Image: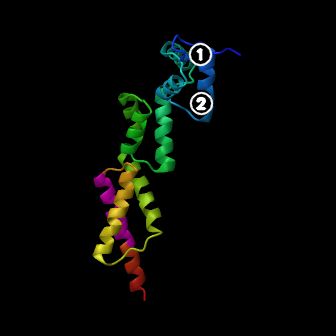
Amino acid sequence: MERATRTNEGKPSGGTEAQAKDVCLRLLTDRARSRAELAQSLAKKGYTPDIAERTLDRLAHVGLIDDASFAEQWVHSRHTYSGKGKQALALELRRKGIEQDIASQALSQISRDDEYERATELVRRKLRTLAVPADPAERDKIVRRLVGMLARRGYGQSLAFGVVKAELDHAGSDTDDLLDGD
C-alpha cells in the first residue's frame, strides 16, 4: 500500500490522487456533497491543495461533483422532509460552500406559496398537541411558541405570524363550533 510522503517537519504531505479519489468516493456514497465539503475533508486528511484540486476537478468532469445539482437536491429534501424555510436553507448552503448564485437558483424552486403551505403544515401538526386557550395571555404564549418554532426553521417573521394567526383563528372557530353544538 502507498504511504503518504513526509515533509522535512515530519508532517504528512498528503497522498496520491488515487487515495484522494478513494476518500471522496467513500464520502459520496453516504450522501451527495458539495465541492467545498470534499475539499475540506481532503485538507483535514492532509492532502495538498494541488492533489485535492486535481482530484476534485476530475470528479467534477465525470459528473460526480455538481454543486448546482447538490444544492437543488439539498433544498428539496430539507424543505420537504425537515420543514426548513428559505432563510435556514440559504444559511445551510452557505455553510456547505455553495456559491450565492447557485444557492439563489436552488432556492428559487420554493415559492412563497410552498413556504406558506409547509409552515401551515408544521403549525397544524404542533397545534394537535396543544390546547388553544381562550385566555389572551395564554394565547399570546402559544403564538410566541409557534412563531419561534417557525423562526428556528428559517421562516420569515411576517410569514410566521400570518400562518400562526390564521391557524389559531381556524382552531378557535373549530372550538366555537363544538361549543355551539351543545
Where does residue 36 sit, x and y in percent of width and height?
Answer: 46, 26
Based on the picture, tell me whether residue 45 belongs to the magenta stretch. no
In this rendering, position of residue 64 left or right of residue 162: right
> Which residue carries the number 2 mark?
27
Vertical relation: 15 (above or below) 135? above
In this rendering, position of residue 85 left or right of residue 76: left
Where does residue 1 sit, x and y in percent of width and height?
Answer: 71, 16
**Kind of residue sitting beneath label 2:** Leu
Quadrant in which the C terminus appears = bottom left
What element does badge 1 sit on? loop
In the picture as drawn, the residue positioned furthest to the top comes out as 8
| Tag 2 and tag 1, C-beta contact below 8 Å | no
- In whole angstroms, how far apart are the C-alphas of marks 2 and 1? 17 Å
In this rendering, position of residue 120 left or right of residue 159: right
What element does badge 2 sit on? helix
At x 37% / y 48%, what residue is drawn? 154
Query: In terms of secondary structure, what is the magenta stretch mainly?
Result: helix
Where does residue 55 sit, x and y in percent of width and height?
Answer: 55, 16
Based on the picture, tell me whether residue 166 belongs to the magenta stretch. yes
